[in-house]
Image (cartoon, grey):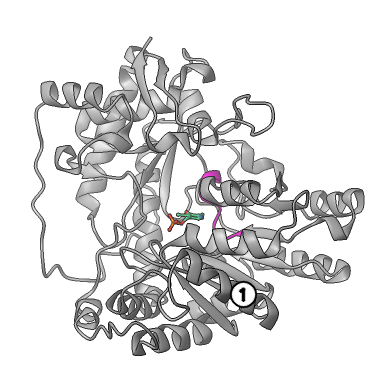
Amino acid sequence: MNKEFYPAEPFRIKSVETVKMISREEREQVIKDAGYNTFLIDSEDVYIDLLTDSGTNAMSDKQWAGMMIGDEAYAGSKNFKHLEATVQELFGFKHIVPTHQGRGAENLLSQIAIKPGQYVPGNMYFTTTRYHQERNGGIFVDIIRSEAHDASIDIPFKGDIDVEKLKNLIEEKGAENIAYVCLAVTVNLAGGQPVSMKNMREVRELTNKYGISVFYDATRCVENAYFIKEQEEGFADKSISDIVLEMFSYSDGCTMSGKKDCLVNIGGFLCMNDDDLFNDAKELVVVYEGMPSYGGMAGRDMEAMAIGLRESMQFEYIQHRVKQVRYLGQKLIEAGVPIVEPVGGHAVFLDARRFCPHLSQEQFPAQSLAANLYVESGVRSMERGIVSAGRDRKTGKNHAPKLETVRLTIPRRVYTYSHMDLVADAVIKLYKHKEDIKGLKFVYEPKQLRFFTARFEEI
Ligand SMILES: *Cc1c(COP(=O)(O)O)cnc(C)c1O
C-alpha cells in the first residue's frame, strides 16, 4: 500500500451483530428474485452491506444512553431543546425545524422557497433533492465544475461550483428568476467530492451581489470539513467544528439528512436564519411531519441525534471515517480497477463505463455490475448512473449522466479494515472476468425515483 497513514478504529466494539454468507447458488436465485435490483434484496441475504451510509450508522454507548431519556411529550420535548441548542451552536443558524429525514426538509424548503418557473442551480443533482425542486415547479440547473463529470480527473475539491457558470445563469435568467442556490457538501453523486471554503466564500460574495439566497445540502458537512482541514491552505490547525461553523456562515440555511453525518438511524432537519421563512416552514411542517418540536422524530431519536452530531466533530472519529473509505479506494486503484478519483468522503464509486466497456449505457452497466458483485461475494452496493438519474419530466427521455457508477458506501463505525480487504478482493476478482457481466432491460419501471423499486432481467 502507499504511504498514507491509516489510523486504527478509534473505538472498541461493545455489541455485535452476526452476519451470514449464503451460497453462490442461493445468491443467484436471490438476485433473480430481486429483479437485479440490490434495493430489493433482503438484508438477511447480504454478507457485507454497502448499499448506503444512510441510517446504517452504529450509535455510541452515549447515544444509546440518550435513547433512555427520551421525552415523548407531544409538544415541547426537552430533547428537541437539546437538539435545537446543539444545532444552533455547531451550525450557527437561528432556526431549526425537525423532519423525519432529509427529504422531509427538502420538501418543506422547496415548497416555501421556489416559485414555479424559477431556476434552482446546484452542484450536481441529488435524487430526492431534485425531485422536490421539480415537483414544486423549479428548474434544476447543474453548475458544478466540469471536471466533476469526469471520473478519471484526480483534483482536490472536485465538488466546487463553477462560479462563472453560476454568474452566467444569473445574468441570463435574471436574479429574480433564481429561487436559491443549492450547494451540497459533499457532492454525493460526484463521488462524495468536497467543496472548498474558498468556493463557498466566492458563491456567497456573488449571490450577495444579486440578493440571492444560498441553502446547503448539509448531509455530509462534517466529512467536507475534514477534507478542508486536510487539503485547503490555512485550515490545518483549525478544529472540525470551527470549519463547519465557517462553512455555514456563507449560507442562509440548510437541509440535513440526519441519517448520515449525525450518526443516527433516522431523522433530519431544516435550518434558516430568516424569521418569515421560519414561520412558513413551521406552518407546513405540521402538515407533513408533525409538531415543530418533533417533526416526525421520537424524542429519543432527537436526543441521539444531538449527541451524535457532537461526536461526529471529533477529529479522531472523522479522520478514521474518511481514511477507511480511502483505504478501500486505494486498494482498488493499485489493482487497476477503474474508480472515481479522488476517493470521496463516504464511498468508493466504481466507474462502470470503464469496468464494463462492452456494455452501452442503455444496457444499464452499473445496475448489472452491482447485481454481479452481489452474486460474486454477497457484498451489496448501489447503482448511481442512468437508472438513478431517471427521465426528464417534460420530454420523457432518460437523463444520461456522464458518471455511470456503482457506489460502495461505507456505513459509519460499522465495518473494519478487514471487511474492506474482503470487499476489495471481491471487486478485483470480478474485474478479472468482467466480460461475463451481461446487460439488463426494464421489466418494471416506476414513474418516480425509479431506482428504488425497478425490476430488470438480463438481455
Ligand atoms: C440522503 C441524502 C438526501 C436525502 O436524505 P434522506 O434522509 O434520505 O431523506 C439528500 N441529499 C443527499 C446528498 C443525501 O445523500
Q: Is residue 147 magenta?
A: no
Closer to us: 398 or 220: 398
Up the image or down, 361 lies above or below 235; here it is above
Seen in the image, is 425 located left or right of residue 364?
left
Q: Is residue 189 magenta?
A: yes
Q: How many marks?
A: 1
Residue in the picture at 68% in, 74% down:
252
Up the image or down, 413 lies above or below 309; here it is above
Residue in the picture at 62% in, 78% down:
278
Closer to us: 110 or 439: 110
Q: Position of residue 334 (x, y in %)?
A: 39, 37
| Magenta residues, start to end | 184-190
Q: Is mark 1 within 8 Å of ligand 1?
A: no
> Label 1, on which residue?
248
Q: Position of residue 447 (x, y in %)?
A: 50, 32
Residue 92 appears in the picture as rendered: no
Q: Position of residue 212 (x, y in %)?
A: 80, 66
For label 1, the crowd category at 10 Å Cα-Cα, with few meaning under 14, some 14 to 19 and many 20 or more, is: many
Q: Which residue sits furthest front?
A: 287
Seen in the image, is 129 located left or right of residue 395?
left
Q: Secondary structure at mark 1?
A: helix
Residue 145 appears in the picture as rendered: yes
Indicate the quadrant containing the C terminus: top left, top right, bottom left or bottom right: top left
Seen in the image, is 406 located left or right of residue 271?
left
Residue in the picture at 41% in, 15% down:
439
Up the image or down, 315 lies above or below 8; here it is below
Residue in the picture at 15% in, 37% down:
45
